[in-house]
């Protein structure tokens, strides 16, 4: 079965520091990969996505992610974190099954930012 | 573009009553809509997938008689929680897919359901 893991439940960084959030997936075919951010009590906002092509993907708010097939990873990075980046981050993989292309979400990583 | 709305954003109901949540795609036609449930500090779990004009497909462990889903038009899906109980209290998020932009889904802002 397809699965998505985010090894870090909670990460704390200082404002201005760099950030890397990890995402690993288990998937038998070429995956579609997404990163979303969720502020408390809010819906999901798409940060970036990977479908094919260049393995380094640029997103909104200064985020980028790199797809590494050999490591089954799609890690999210930001060179300098802002206090407003504090939120929950979800990696998601699109799986294929008899019912269509459904998302499978990772457990999430909560980011705290110190002033 | 690709905006999805949900109504209401918050609802409180008494145990044993039913509550309906609406999900609308505002600027595109959604052939498929999805309903997720998110408990506090947890990830999103897919409950069901609905295609316009046909019956919803429920994920394993989700009671289809309790969570009624109707996708009567290309812009509207509804989730009705019947005979709600406190354990149904959760954050419910819908998403919609535009068949011309698969596999991407567009997410609504969520509905906080509290059952007292």
Image: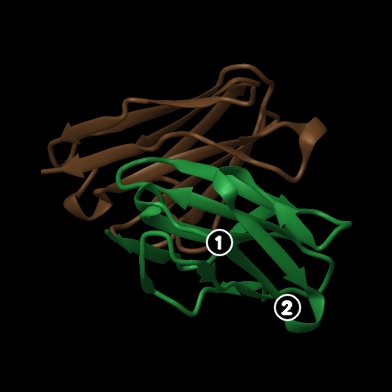
Chain colours: A green, B brown
In the visual, does B9 lie left or right of B57? left
Residue at (49% x, 80% y) in the render: A7
Vertical position of residue B70 compared to residue A15: above or below:
above
Q: Are marks 2 and 1 in contact (CB under 8 Å)?
A: no
| Residue A79 marker | 1
Residue A39, percent from left and from top:
36, 47
Is residue A62 visible in this depiction of the protein? Answer: yes
Q: Quadrant of the N terminus of chain B?
A: top right
Marks 2/1: CA–CA distance: 22 Å
Q: Residue at horizontal 37%, vertical 59%?
A: A15
- Frontmost of labels 2 and 1 is 1
* Residue at image mark 2: A72
Q: Chain of mark 2?
A: A
Q: Position of residue A47 (x, y in %)?
A: 59, 47
Q: Are marks 2 and 1 on the same chain?
A: yes
Circle 1 packing at 10 Å, graded few (<14), some (14-19), many (20+), is few
Q: Secondary structure at mark 2?
A: loop
Going by the image, does A19 lie left or right of A113?
right
Where, by quadrant of the figure, is residue A17 drawn? bottom left
What residue lies at 17% left-to-right and 43% top-to-bottom? B115
């Amino acid at each position: 079965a397809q699965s998505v893991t985010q090894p870090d439940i909670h990460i704390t960084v200082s404002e201005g520091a760099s950030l890397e959030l990890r995402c690993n997936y288990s998937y038998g075919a070429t995956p579609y990969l997404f990163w979303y951010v969720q502020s408390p009590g809010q819906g999901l906002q798409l940060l970036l996505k990977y479908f094919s092509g260049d393995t380094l993907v640029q997103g909104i708010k200064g985020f980028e992610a790199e797809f590494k097939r050999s490591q089954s990873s799609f890690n999210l990075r930001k060179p300098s974190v802002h206090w407003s980046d504090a939120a929950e981050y979800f990696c998601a993989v699109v799986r294929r099954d008899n019912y269509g292309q459904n998302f499978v979400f990772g457990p999430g990583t909560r980011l705290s930012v110190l002033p | 573009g690709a905006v999805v709305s949900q109504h209401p954003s918050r609802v409180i109901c008494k145990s044993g009553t039913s509550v309906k949540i609406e999900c609308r795609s505002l600027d595109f036609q959604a052939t498929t809509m999805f309903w997720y449930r998110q408990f506090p500090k947890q990830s999103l779990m897919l409950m069901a997938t609905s295609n316009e004009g046909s019956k919803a497909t429920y994920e394993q462990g989700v009671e289809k008689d309790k969570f009624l889903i109707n996708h009567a038009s290309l812009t509207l899906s509804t989730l009705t929680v019947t005979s709600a109980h406190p354990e149904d209290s959760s954050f419910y998020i819908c998403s919609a897919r535009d068949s011309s932009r698969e596999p991407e889904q567009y997410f609504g802002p969520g509905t906080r359901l509290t059952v007292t």
